[in-house]
Image (spheres, rainbow, N blue to C red):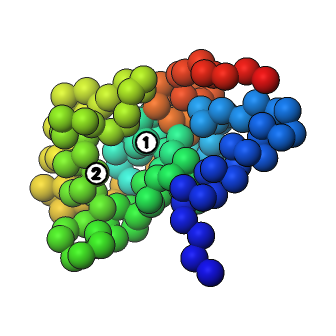
Amino acid sequence: MLVSTFSLVRLACVTTLVSGVTLIACGGPTSPAGTTSGTGGGATTDLPCAIHELLADRCVSCHSSPAKYGAPMPLVTRADLAAPVFGGQGNVAELSLERMQAAKPMPPPPNERATDAEIAAFSAWIDDGMPAGAVGQSCGGGDGAGAGGGGGLPCEPALAL
């Protein structure tokens, strides 16, 4: 039997209401799978640091591994970004760039969208063939907390029980 994502989200909300515990879509800290702690609080990644930090700061609160909150895929590793999109029209990195530049950009409000400089760096990385980062590099910044950094999405609960 195929269970839709909507049904699972609805079930989670009902379970939350019944249990009397407030569950908010703005989750706590996440650690992107495929990265490991490096020195100085950074993470070792196969992506160039600028790309890793962009994704960690803006995307992985939902596009973690495994993806959460209805996100369709993780955006954590170079392999995630190089994967073909459904229908064979490009790869996940190209689709991600389109979504960052769209009239309704990702990440969605109230989260801060990627800056023009971040989008330009991501675009240039794609144009350069999506090269891997240096082997064993440790990147600072992006703590894996996602949009806004600092331990979760920057929103307030709409409902408290």
Q: Quadrant of residue 128?
A: bottom left
Residue name at image x 12 percent, y 55 percent: 127
Amino acid type, residue under disc 1 in the picture: Cys
Residue name at image x 51 percent, y 52 percent: 70
Q: Residues within 10 Å of mark 1 (few under 14, many from 20)?
A: many
User: Would residue 20 appear left or right of 107 to someone viewing this image?
Assistant: right
Residue name at image x 53 percent, y 22 percent: 154
Nearer to the camera, 139 or 111: 111
* Residue 59 locus on image (x, y percent): 43, 42
Mark drawn on residue 59: 1
Residue found at the very far bottom of the displayed protein: 1
Secondary element at image label 2: helix
Secondary element at image label 1: loop
Q: Are marks 1 and 2 in contact (CB under 8 Å)?
A: yes
* Residue 30 locus on image (x, y percent): 63, 42
Q: Is residue 32 visible?
A: no
Relative vertical location of residue 67 with respect to residue 118 in this rendering, above or below: below
- Earlier along the polypeptide chain: callout 1 or callout 2? 1
Residue indicated by mark 2: 96
Mark drawn on residue 99: none
Number of labelled discs? Answer: 2
Nearer to the camera, 102 or 35: 102
* Residue 107 locus on image (x, y percent): 37, 36
Amino acid type, residue under disc 2 in the picture: Ser
Real-space CA distance between mark 1 and mark 2, rounded to the nearest whole angstrom: 10 Å
Which quarter of the figure is the C terminus placed in?
A: top right
User: Would residue 39 appear left or right of 16 to someone viewing this image?
Assistant: left
* Residue 109 locus on image (x, y percent): 39, 27
